[in-house]
Amino acid sequence: MRNLTINEISKDEFNRLTGVLLLNKPAGITSHDLVDKVRRITGIRKVGHAGTLDPFATGLMIVLIGKYTKLAEQYTRYDKEYSFELLIGATTKTLDPESEIITQKDSSSLEDKEIIKVIKSFQGSSFQTVPVFSSVKVSGVRLREYAHSSENIVIESKGSNTSVATFMLKQGSKYQTKSQKGTIKIVLPRKKITIKKISVDSISDTTSKSLDKFPPNNPALKLIKTTAKVNKGTYIRQLAKDIGVKLGGYPAMLYSLERTKIGEFSLEDVITLSELQEKINTLNS
């Protein structure tokens, strides 16, 4: 594997396809969907990736083929860089555009210099509460499974460093038991993160009426274009929420998210699926 070349397809000693690809995931599909597209093009099942992106998100993904799937853990350890838009003054259950707005608050009184100061204060190491819509397991169950099985979720702060999520389960949920009486309470895990660099590119005033992902409403919102370099395991959705809290308890969420770098790999290095197909055709000719 010392001679590994990114974005090149080769055959191993058993004549099986192998390679490491850098691809640009479009919005509207899952990371698994992208892996399936590569499976169809290559004709092999042994395809994986080194770090998922939510369906609404776009950007760089490392896709691994054949024997190189064993490198997944190595690549997931790399730092990530993101370009994203924060929406201050509104939030959804999932902290992103994949669900409906549940809370709004006029944020027109917030000054740009205050917003910039608060966002930059997150640079460095800190502890982050894991969001309920995440793959982190508690008692063997992923938090997002509880979240998707709930009619409502209430998150309460218990002291400065502890948050408790109450999942109000849907009728008939497989997680319901007699002892839980339709609810599950979980102390949300906290993990140490490092934001190595964060900056504000622009701040604009808007309302949900002008945002195509949401129905029209009245409160004035702040849309903030931001870039950040973070370590493995940092949740940008939770960062958005925490910024809103630190600004004085404003609801906040991600409006858009693009992963621009993984380690030293960037979006400038990607190949298209059409180019991948051409490589396969050449290899098999």
Image (spheres, rainbow, N blue to C red):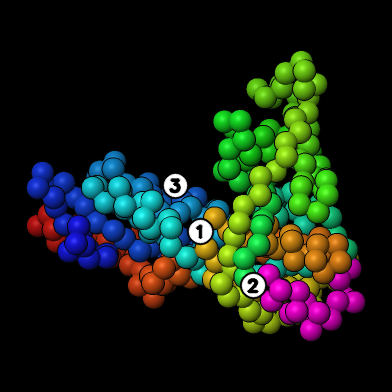
Label 1 neighbourhood size at 10 Å, few (<14), some (14-19), many (20+)? some
In the foreground, 206 or 107: 107
Tell which tag, 3 or 1, sits nearer the viewer: 1
Dot 2: element: loop
What residue sits 70% from the left and 43% below the top?
Answer: 188
Q: Position of residue 216 (x, y in %)?
A: 81, 62
Query: For mark 1, what is the residue?
Result: 232
Give the Cα distance between marks 3 and 1: 20 Å
The disc labelled 3 sits on which kind of residue?
Answer: His
Magenta residue check for 121: yes
Residue 241 found in image quarter: bottom right
Regarding residue 217, the answer to whether it shows in the image is no
The residue furthest top is 178
Residue 123: assigned label: 2
Q: Position of residue 276 (x, y in %)?
A: 27, 61
Residue 174 found in image quarter: top right
Q: Earlier in the sequence, mark 3 or mark 1?
A: 3
Residue 177 found in image quarter: top right
Q: Position of residue 157 (x, y in %)?
A: 82, 48
Residue 11: assigned label: none
Q: Which region shows up in magenta?
A: 106-122
Magenta residue check for 182: no
Q: Quadrant of the N terminus?
A: bottom left
Regarding residue 6, the answer to whether it shows in the image is yes
The disc labelled 2 sits on which kind of residue?
Answer: Gln
Relative to 147, does residue 41 appear above or below in the rendering?
below
Q: Earlier in the sequence, mark 2 or mark 1?
A: 2
Residue 32: assigned label: 3
The disc labelled 1 sits on which kind of residue?
Answer: Lys
